[in-house]
Image (spheres, grey):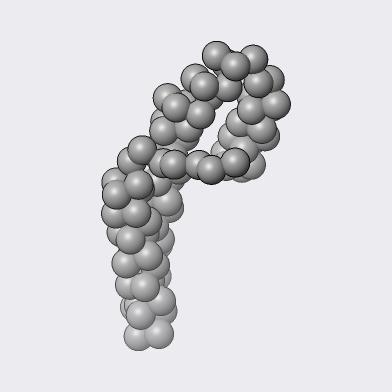
Amino acid sequence: MEHHHHDTKKIVNRLSRAIGHLEAVKKMIENDADCCDVLIQLAAVRSAVNNAGKEILKDHLNHCIVEAVESGDEKALVALNDAIDKFMK
């Protein structure tokens, strides 16, 4: 089944931000940066990844799940619950 994300550019930008933060963490570790600064940068990585996940979830709810409910596809709801459980761990 083909799948199109409606906010691809926004999600890619958020993921690029996460990659940039993670690269900064790697350089900080290589350069023996202060642990507190590394932890703050890691928090930025986590936030960027979570925000990307939030955008994907909103897109999925607004489009895929709406279509699934309209067509009576209960498997999509089960899959969504499973994905949310894994994402929230």
The quadrant of the rendering that contains the C terminus is top right
Q: Is residue 77 left or right of residue 47?
A: right
Along the line of sight, which residue is nearer the eye, 14 or 8?
8
Q: Is residue 32 above or below residue 35?
A: below
Residue in view at x 66 percent, y 32 percent: 79
Residue 77 percent across, percent down from the top left: 64, 24
Most extreme residue toward the bottom is 31
Along the line of sight, which residue is nearer the eye, 32 or 4?
4
Q: Is residue 38 above or below residue 62?
A: below
The quadrant of the rendering that contains the N terminus is top right
Along the line of sight, which residue is nearer the eye, 35 or 85?
85
Residue 36 visible in the picture: no
Most extreme residue toward the front is 1
Residue 31 percent across, percent down from the top left: 35, 85
Q: Is residue 72 above or below residue 35?
A: above
Residue 2 percent across, percent down from the top left: 53, 43
Which of the 4 image quadrants contains residue 55?
top left
Residue in view at x 42 percent, y 51 percent: 49
Q: Is residue 22 above or below residue 57?
A: below
Which of the 4 image quadrants contains residue 29?
bottom left
